[in-house]
Amino acid sequence: MSRALAAALFLFAWAAAAPTQIRGDDSVPRDGHILCQEDLGFGGPGKSVLLACGDPLATGGTAFVQLLNAPSNTTAFLVVSLTQAAASFKGGTLVPVPVLLLKAFTTDAAGEFLIPGVPGGGGPLAIYLQCVTVDAGQPQGFGLSNAVKLQLLP
């Protein structure tokens, strides 16, 4: 499978994804083993944290993407790219540049959202993720999470 086709299929699945209500057992795979994708840093302003954890993202594996510590009931944008570059944005650093996909979500009362069942396979392919949240408590009105490198495997 070509990189372009794998990326298109992955991004199509993401664009259709809707966050779900977080339950206590959502973030732990059935076998109890959890792998988190690489945290690239660059969080702030704000205190939100982006995680991508679960199985290794090879064919048949799944993971979840979760935003934590964002403002309650606010708009959060998941920014997705196939490349990384450090671009100044609203008082922070946006890593997934150029932006390939921008997906809006709403955080819950705890300032979180969860996307379960992110499929693996189609790699090797790196996908870069970061969240931008509307945050009136920040000087420029937006907060940025850390960036995450999602590594799809064959």
Image (tube, rainbow, N blue to C red):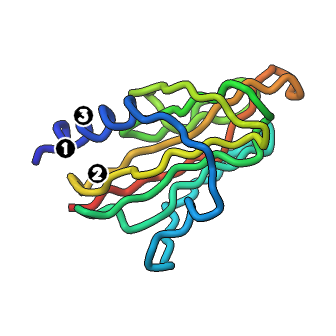
Q: CA distance from mark 3 to mark 1?
A: 8 Å
Specify the quadrant that holds the C terminus.
Answer: bottom left
Residue designated by label 2? 125
C-alpha separation, residue under disc 1 versus residue under disc 2: 7 Å
- Tell me if label 3 and label 2 are in contact, CB under 8 Å: no
Q: Element under label 1?
A: helix
Q: Nearer the viewer, residue 87 or 125?
A: 125
Q: Residues within 10 Å of mark 2 (few under 14, many from 20)?
A: some
Q: Which sits earlier in the primary sequence, circle 3 or circle 1?
A: 1
Q: Viewer-nearest of labels 3 and 2?
A: 3
Residue type, label 2: Leu
Query: What residue do we see at 58% from left, 31% from top?
Result: 87
Calculate the distance from the C-alpha at mark 3 to the C-alpha at mark 2: 11 Å
Q: Which residue is mark 3?
A: 8
Picture quadrant of residue 77? top right
First-in-chain label (3 vs 2): 3
Residue at (61% x, 36% y) in the render: 131
Residue closest to the eye, 52 or 148: 52
Residue density around tag 1, few if under 14, some if 14–19, many if 20 or more, within 10 Å: few
Residue reaching furthest left? 1
Disc 3 marks which amino acid?
Ala
Q: Position of residue 99 (x, y in %)?
A: 45, 27
Residue 112 is marked as none
**Image coords of residue 104 (percent x, y):** 55, 25
Amino acid type of the residue that numbered disc 1 sits on in the rendered structure: Arg
The residue at which mark 1 appears reads as: 3
Circle 2 sits in a helix, a strand or a loop, which is it?
strand
As drawn, 87 above or below 34: above
State the image quarter where residue 40 is shown.
bottom right
